[in-house]
Amino acid sequence: MQNRVDTRRGLLIILSSPSGAGKSTLSKRLREWDPTIEFSVSATTRAPRSGEEDGVDYHFLTEDAFKETVAKDGMLEHAHVFGNFYGSPKAPVQKAIENGADVLFDVDWQGAQQISRSSLQDHVLSIFVLPPSIKELRRRLESRGQDAAEVIQKRMSKSWDEISHWDGYNYVLINDDLDTTFERLKAIISAERLKLSQQPGMMDFIRGLHQEFTEVEE
Ligand code: ADP
Ligand code: 5GP
């Protein structure tokens, strides 16, 4: 009998945090750690930051193109965040899940909630990343050097709105020391991959073991 115990269901790994707490940094590290994790490249109507590449960091869309995709049911979830539209295109996620691959999402609490309530909810692993303090959150946003002062202020003033949804997630990590947080994140993902519910091939393995048991031991 073929042993299919190594097949497993793909996870939808959702990372959320107030802007600046470190989810893009953690997400980049995760993909370096395991390149088989597919990143869900979101669509957005916001302007690209310097260094951001269309199709890699985001799909940069006009508002009309974004709304058309939503109207055609092309987004797994979508939300209005900081005055712009953001959404996760549905087709690449469905394809990845069919192939048993994990998909990583960097989305806000609204996106996390919609994915967690979608038809793919059984695949969801949601993780919320907190800053060690509000002062440090501001320092990180400023040190990133990517946003104008008024954009930083807008993100800071919205940070509590995001933080207030912390308890809707499977795990919460305080991102104080980056290496420690990353180790914890890897531990969470490694353990979730081994959950019985993620291993559909286990039943075949048990049947094989039982057959061997009856042949050898009975
Ligand atoms: P987010 O994606 O949540 O908006 P980023 O990953 O862009 O946040 O991180 C914001 C800034 O904080 C970046 O300059 C990043 O290098 C820095 N940063 C991330 N995590 C830590 C950490 N644990 N300690 C210190 N700086 C951090
Ligand atoms: P930024 O503009 O800093 O890249 O992202 C701003 C916020 O939008 C972050 O909280 C980020 O997680 C969220 N975001 C990015 N992509 C998506 C998406 O596809 N859907 C949702 N709901 N939020 C997103």
Image: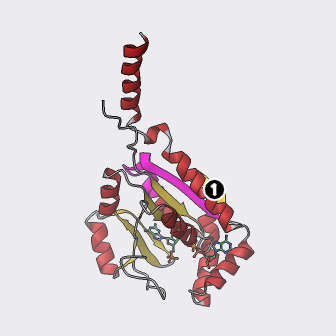
In the rendered image, the residue lying farthest to the left is 72
Disc 1 residue type (three-letter): Arg
Position of 95 compared to 175: left or right? left
Residue bearing mark 1 = 184
Position of 187 compared to 177: left or right? left
Q: Which residues are magenta?
A: 114-131
What is the number of callouts on the image?
1
Residue 213: say if magenta: no
- The residue located at (36%, 77%) in the rendering is 55
Residue 91 in the image: x percent, y percent? 29, 61
Residue 130 in the image: x percent, y percent? 65, 64
Q: Is residue 107 visible?
A: no
Can you say which quadrant of the picture contains the N terminus? top left
User: 160 or 105: nearer the eye?
Assistant: 105
- Vertical side of 61 occupied by 2: above or below: above
- Vertical side of 212 occupied by 154: above or below: below
Residue 154 in the image: x percent, y percent? 59, 81
